[in-house]
Each structure stands twice: as structure tokens, then as C-alpha cells.
Amino acid sequence: PDLKAMVGLPDFDWAARNYLPLLNYTYYRNGAAGESSYRNNLEVFGRYTFIPEVMNDVTKIEESLPTTILGHNFSAPFYISPCAYGLYGHPNAEANFVKGAAAGKILYIPSGYASLSIEEIHALKAEGQVVFQQLYLTTNDTETQSLFDRSKAAGADALVFTVDAPIFGSRHRAARLDVSLALYTNDTYYQWDYYHKLQNMTDLPIIVKGIMSAKDAKKAVENKVPAIVLSNHGGRQLDGAPSALEVAIDIYKEAPEVFNQTEVFADGGVRYGTDALKLLALGVKAVGLGRPFMYSNVFGQEGVERVIELFKKELAVDGANVGLGSLKDINPGFLNLSPNNWH
Ligand code: FNR
């Protein structure tokens, strides 16, 4: 496929499906079980409409894209979510993400199950580039300490602790092609008091990824978590888990103060500028994109850069059509919280 023919993020799914060996594509595409959550992640955005404003000065919207994430400056409120095994998409694997993120000045969060090691990925950073590090942790303190120390020594600026996958999800689509991708358990049972122990093992901020309810968002605040990611793991873990937009709406209704008490990020199914704007309207600070970047890697670093460029353009165009003078002006008043009946 021709990179110039890619006009929006869903096109990269099409390109990867046509280009990659079936098993590689299926590993990325897979959702858990009947894939209801996978589909809902994509479809939920269509159930909520904007309440646009007209006759506003929207000429400077593009200048308003830059934002901060845990105090670090980035050119836009979206980032590359941690996804395992970059090698399934391109021989350079994660190298294309770290370099593409540097070129586009956005945040990259490598997976703890990347194809390159923590050290290899962080060694590829540009001067001054901020990169976080996602980790899957076991309750083995020696292993955890070693992962924390390696991440710190490699230069990671924050850690991401993924809590929505205590056990590998039932992913039938890929398991049908390769039984080694069928169910297995890995016994990583931790509770909130474990978070305090973790935070005492490193001076890097530890973000909690995989919050799926307002109740748990409040618990994260009580446990002084500096940032949370509303995520159902791209619908790959619990089929039936709510989408980030539904969780963000629940938080807005039940505990809106959470958005000021911790930095709230969200991912899952974000494919259009409008999807991101709906999350930002509720108080989400930045959104993560997983599959679109994994698929874009079939074009190498150029593909990664193209996704960044396209998504920045969409954010600006869509923001202007919502009637925003600045992306920072978006607020819950621009979103109709009653779902429509279009679907
Ligand atoms: C993931 N995700 C993930 N999350 C994480 O914390 N560590 C990981 O190693 C992985 N691995 C992974 C592999 C693949 C192939 C996918 C698609 C996803 C979840 C990821 O960070 C993110 O939550 C979702 O990908 C967001 O949904 P979309 O953008 O893919 O729809």
C-alpha cells in the first residue's frame, strides 16, 4: 500500500490486514472472547454527539494543540500506548515508535513486553526526548526492583503499571491460529496496598493503567496515584468491560473532582479527532492510541510520523468545527451526555 493513500487512521488497519502475515495482524487486531468490548470501544463514540458552537474565532486552534503530561511538554494531547511485540509489524520494531515520537514531539510509552529491551529502546531517544516505560509486575520484589532500576538507569521519565491484566485475556481469534497464544495464567495478584510498596521502591512517578470504574478512579486518588489511564486494554482482557468514554462519563457524573485530583488519560478505540475531543471534553488530559500505531509500523517510521501528522490535523479541524477557539476551551458543555439512538 501507498502511504500517501492513507487519509485517516482506520486506513492503517486496512493496510496492515493486507500487508502482514495473518498471524501478525491477528495478534494486533485481537479482542477478548466475543469482542463486544473491542467493538464498543470503536462504536461508543458514535453514540454521543457534540453540542457545537458557531460564529466563534477558530483561526488559532492549531497553535493550541501542545499540552503537558506529568509536567513534560508535548506537541499534542495524544500518545503512543504501550503495545507488545513491535517486531510483528516491522523488522525495526519499537525503534520506529521511539524515533517517530521524537519527530512528532509526542509521548511514547514502550511496552514491558516489547521486542527490544528497555535499554535498547531508551538508548534510541533523541536529545531531551521524554519516554515513559510500561511494566507488567509480579509480586516478586526482586524482579520488580530490578525492572524499576533498569527503567530508571535507561532514562525513563515515568513508569506505567498495568493493572487490568491479572491473567491473560481469552483471545480466541489469535489462539485459533497459534495455540501458544491460547489461555495461560500468570498469577500476578496485587491489591492497592501493593501500590504504596511500589512507590517506595522508586522515585519515578507510577501511573496506574487500566481503570474501568469511577469507584476505582476514586480509590486511585485516595492512594495518591499521580496519573491514571482509563482503559480496557483495547478490549483484549475482559469482554464486557466498559469503554474509556463510558467510564469518563461515570466519573464526570459521580466524582468530577477526580479530573483535578490526578491526571486522567484514556485509551481504546480512538481513531478520529472527534473521538479524542469527546474524551478531552470530560476532563481527560491526553488520549492513547494503540493499534493505529502498531498498524502504521508496516510503513516503518514514516508510517508512525504520518499517523501523528494526520491525527494532529484532525484534532485541529474537528476542534474548529466544534467551535473551539483553543483546544483548552473544550469542556463538558460541548458534549451531549444522553446517548443518541442512531445505532
Ligand atoms: C496492547 N495493550 C497493552 N497494554 C499494556 O499496558 N501493555 C502491553 O504490553 C500491551 N500490549 C498490547 C498489545 C497489542 C497488540 C494491543 C492492541 C494492545 C493495550 C494498549 O496499551 C491500549 O490500552 C490499547 O491498545 C488501546 O486501544 P486501541 O487504541 O488499540 O483501540
Image: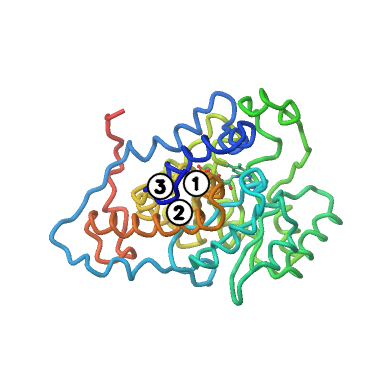
**Residue 46 falls in which quadrant of the image?**
top left
Question: Do residues under tags 1 and 2 come within 8 Å of each other at their CB atoms?
Answer: yes
Q: Amino acid at mark 2?
A: Val
Q: Residues within 10 Å of mark 1 (few under 14, many from 20)?
A: many
Q: Is residue 325 left or right of residue 264?
A: left
Which circle marks residue 307 in the picture? 2
CA gap between label 3 and label 2 equals: 9 Å
Relative to 311, does residue 99 appear above or below in the rendering?
A: below
Quarter of the figure with the C terminus: top left
Q: Which mark is residue 6?
A: 3
Q: Residues within 10 Å of mark 2 (few under 14, many from 20)?
A: many
- Identify which residue is drawn at 71% across, 59% down: 196
Q: Does any atom of ligand 1 lie closer than 8 Å to the CB of label 1?
A: yes
Q: Ligand 1 lies in which image quarter?
A: top right
Disc 1 residue type (three-letter): Pro
Is label 2 in a helix, a strand or a loop? helix
Q: Residue at x 60, y 62 (%)?
A: 98
Q: CA distance from mark 1 to mark 2?
A: 8 Å
Q: Position of residue 169 (x, y in %)?
A: 65, 32
* 127 or 155, nearer to the observer: 127
Which residue is identified by label 1?
292
